[in-house]
Amino acid sequence: KNEVEQSPQNLTAQEGEFITINCSYSVGISALHWLQQHPGGGIVSLFMLSSGKKKHGRLIATINIQEKHSSLHITASHPRDSAVYICAVRRNTGNQFYFGTGTSLTVIP
Amino acid sequence: DADVTQTPRNRITKTGKRIMLECSQTKGHDRMYWYRQDPGLGLRLIYYSFDVKDINKGEISDGYSVSRQAQAKFSLSLESAIPNQTALYFCATSDTGRAEAFFGQGTRLTVV
């Protein structure tokens, strides 16, 4: 069983739609990351969360530590948002990272 | 310039060949990691290093070795490449006491 589970695995949306990607984890963490991987392969960190909510432009990330759950929201989605979004957690013991399998998002014009 | 640089970005090699993937960072971080990514799987940890004298195996270290030549450099070697090592490889860095991680652009390795 993976320590980090993401849903959905694949998501297709029309431009302008509100998108939610979910992440659940089963271990104690010091932080949770949302990462973006474009078709070229490179990975970019979007957010690092340890509590509450963060917003950057059209992206919003929330985390509920008690429920061990995080969500990434994209408002007014755009084709350039098409990418794989990866949830990763840093354990609070051992300091290693664990990764979800990613959510592949395609936004259609 | 990128904070974490991987070379090469793409490589095709033959079965049985030795190959080295290199990673360098300008963040001044003490911790460095090598991961591989396969379709349908999350990134999996190959090796990690918490400082120059500290090397640790990850969950899939068989067939790989690493060298931490300096705080800024962490190399991954495949001693005798095999086709199931075809994957996308990522180097990452982080700092002790800080949860943020930085990733390289990835190296796409194909073993034929």
Image: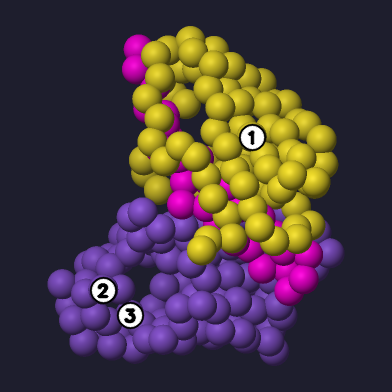
Chain colours: A yellow, B purple
Residue B65 position (above or below residue B105): below
Image quadrant assignment for residue B78: bottom left
Q: Nearer the viewer, residue B15 or A1?
A: A1
User: Where in the figure is residue B43, as x and y percent of width and height?
Assistant: 48, 61
Chain part drawn in magenta: A82-109
Which chain is home to disc 1?
A
Chain for disc number 2? B
Q: Which residue is pictured at 47% across the width and 72% down the height?
A: B22
Quadrant containing the C terminus of chain B in the rendered view: bottom left
Same subunit, labels 1 and 2: the answer reads no
Please name the residue that numbered disc 1 is placed on.
Answer: A71
Whole-angstrom CA distance, mark 1 to mark 2, is: 34 Å
Type of amino acid at the residue the image marks with label 2: Asn
Q: Is residue A98 magenta?
A: yes
Q: Secondary structure at mark 1?
A: strand
Q: Position of residue A67 (x, y in %)?
A: 74, 44
For label 2, the residue is B84
Residue B29 visible to an observer of this rendering: no
Residue drawn at x 38%, y 36% is A10
Q: Position of residue A104 (x, y in %)?
A: 40, 38
